[in-house]
Image (cartoon, grey):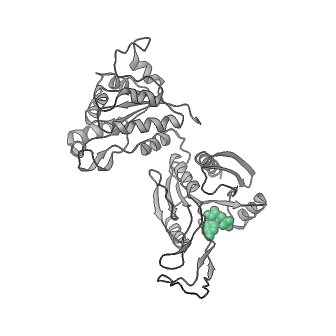
């Protein structure tokens, strides 16, 4: 399960959002990070160290004079072991301390003694967030190259609504993951289609397919991690858009084509992952069709091929297609690549791929076949993005 060996020093300061950091710890540990938790005294008033000790599997430190560290210098040892320090939640008071180089407790001392990047996730009441003194401190932290994650906007524990709440654990986890990935697509614009399409029959019915959108969303996320600006044109799915992605929701293949053509102008890369319906309903009824005993015929008409349309634009971006086949995979897939005139095609045998969390694919390009062994879609997506970046760089 562990796909990385990074150590995060998770600093927890006094705020009710500390309870969310328990979930964040769990997400990081599950993804293979070593999480070393350090808490301030105020944080321990909200959640006990035992909770973080159990979730991280590591001793939790709160005190500068902790005897468990052999050489008596926990502020040095703990920060040297970390690949990054993340303060979540970061209270207004802790931001003040950080921005002025305070070193009067274990967490502030190891932040000032660090030789690794520092990320902070503010969490406070909206008036406290907007307080000019706090904004001055945040501006100082930005000047010092400290990454400010959020805050989010929404309902607060005090009942008010506005900016100041800590980002959700899942969002912070994504930002930490982004932080560690290489950025071969920095400055590139990527347009991705994902999910099924929905071709209306009447006001309430339609034809769709069982595409979950997971592969396309994983690729959108991997492209964000790689530093790209990403637009995700998505058919109906139940998935949350990755952080930082511009998602455009569409229903039919026609809508999807229009949205893609609107977005494609300055794009460097187009990745067609959507399971676009091959046909749309020709005699679509505006109102719900009434039931009767007579046969009902629904006429279908071919949909435009979005990928082939984009690939044939005069200033076409680098195009990547997907091919799902249930037989003769490589032959059909390579024919498809040539017919649609695209440099890279991702071929997968459809057995179990739709809706699953894992996938196993073969990348086909002019250089030949590159099999990617069975792995979670997230990993397949990262390897695909790496391959695309390499092909672009060598163009
Ligand atoms: O021809 P086939 O549907 O198998 O091709 C699959 C690839 O083409 C996928 O990348 C899919 O997103 C794209 N496609 C498209 N528009 C269509 C049909 C397929 O963009 N109408």
Q: Quadrant of residue 77?
A: top left
| Location of residue 42 in the rendering, given as x and y in whole percent from the top left corner | 28, 29
The residue lying at 34 percent from left, 18 percent from top is 64
Q: Quadrant of residue 100?
A: top left
Residue placed most toward the observer, 94 or 141: 94
**Is 155 left, or right, of 370 in this rendering?**
left
State the quadrant of the N terminus: top right
**Is 332 left, or right, of 19 in this rendering?**
right
Give the farthest residue toward the bottom.
294
The residue lying at 32 percent from left, 36 percent from top is 90
| Location of residue 82 in the rendering, given as x and y in whole percent from the top left corner | 47, 27
**Is 144 left, or right, of 384 in this rendering?**
left
Image vertical order of residue 115 relative to residue 268, above or below? above
Image vertical order of residue 168 relative to residue 249, above or below? above
Give the farthest residue toward the front.
293
Give the farthest residue toward the top.
71
| Location of residue 373 in the rendering, given as x and y in whole percent from the top left corner | 70, 45
Image vertical order of residue 261 relative to residue 169, above or below? below
The residue lying at 43 percent from left, 45 percent from top is 171
Answer whether residue 312 is visible to the viewer in this image.
Answer: no
| Location of residue 366 in the rendering, given as x and y in whole percent from the top left corner | 74, 55
Count of numbered circles in the view: 0
Residue placed most toward the observer, 190 or 232: 232
Answer whether residue 178 is visible to the viewer in this image.
Answer: yes
Residue placed most toward the observer, 49 or 273: 49
Q: Quadrant of ligand 1?
A: bottom right
């Amino acid at each position: 399960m562990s796909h990385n060996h990074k150590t995060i020093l998770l600093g927890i300061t006094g705020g009710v959002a500390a309870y969310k950091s328990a979930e964040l710890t769990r997400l990081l540990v599950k993804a293979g990070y070593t999480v070393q938790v350090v808490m301030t005294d105020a944080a321990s008033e909200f959640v006990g160290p035992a909770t973080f000790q159990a979730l991280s599997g590591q001793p939790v430190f709160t005190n500068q004079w902790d005897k468990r560290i052999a050489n008596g210098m926990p502020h040095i040892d703990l920060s040297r072991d970390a690949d990054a320090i993340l303060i979540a939640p970061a209270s207004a008071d802790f931001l003040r301390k950080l921005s002025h180089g305070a070193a009067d407790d274990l967490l502030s001392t190891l932040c000032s003694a660090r030789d690794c990047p520092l990320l902070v996730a503010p969490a406070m009441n909206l008036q406290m967030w907007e307080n000019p003194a706090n904004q001055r401190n945040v501006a100082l932290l930005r000047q010092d190259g400290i990454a400010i994650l959020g805050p989010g906007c929404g309902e607060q524990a005090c009942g008010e609504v506005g900016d100041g709440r800590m980002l959700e654990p899942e969002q912070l986890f994504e930002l930490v993951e982004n932080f560690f990935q290489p950025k071969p697509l920095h400055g590139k614009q990527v347009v991705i289609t994902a999910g099924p399409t929905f071709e209306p029959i009447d006001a309430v019915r339609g034809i769709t397919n069982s595409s979950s959108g997971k592969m396309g969303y994983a690729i959108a996320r991997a492209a964000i991690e790689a530093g790209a600006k990403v637009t995700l044109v998505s058919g109906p799915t139940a998935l949350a858009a990755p952080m930082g992605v511009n998602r455009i929701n569409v229903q039919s293949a026609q809508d999807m084509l229009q949205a893609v053509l609107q977005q494609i102008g300055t794009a460097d890369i187009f990745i067609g992952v959507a399971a676009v319906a091959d046909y749309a309903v020709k005699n679509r009824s505006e109102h719900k069709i009434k039931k009767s005993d007579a046969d009902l015929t629904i006429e279908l008409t071919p949909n435009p091929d979005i990928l082939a349309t984009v690939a044939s634009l005069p200033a076409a971006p680098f195009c990547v297609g997907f091919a799902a086949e249930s037989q003769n995979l490589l032959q059909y897939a390579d024919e498809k690549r040539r017919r649609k005139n695209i440099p890279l095609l991702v071929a997968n045998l459809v057995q179990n791929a739709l809706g699953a969390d894992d996938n196993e694919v073969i990348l086909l390009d002019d250089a030949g076949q590159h099999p990617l062994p069975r792995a979670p879609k997230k990993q397949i997506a990262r390897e695909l993005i790496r391959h695309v970046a390499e092909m672009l760089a060598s163009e």
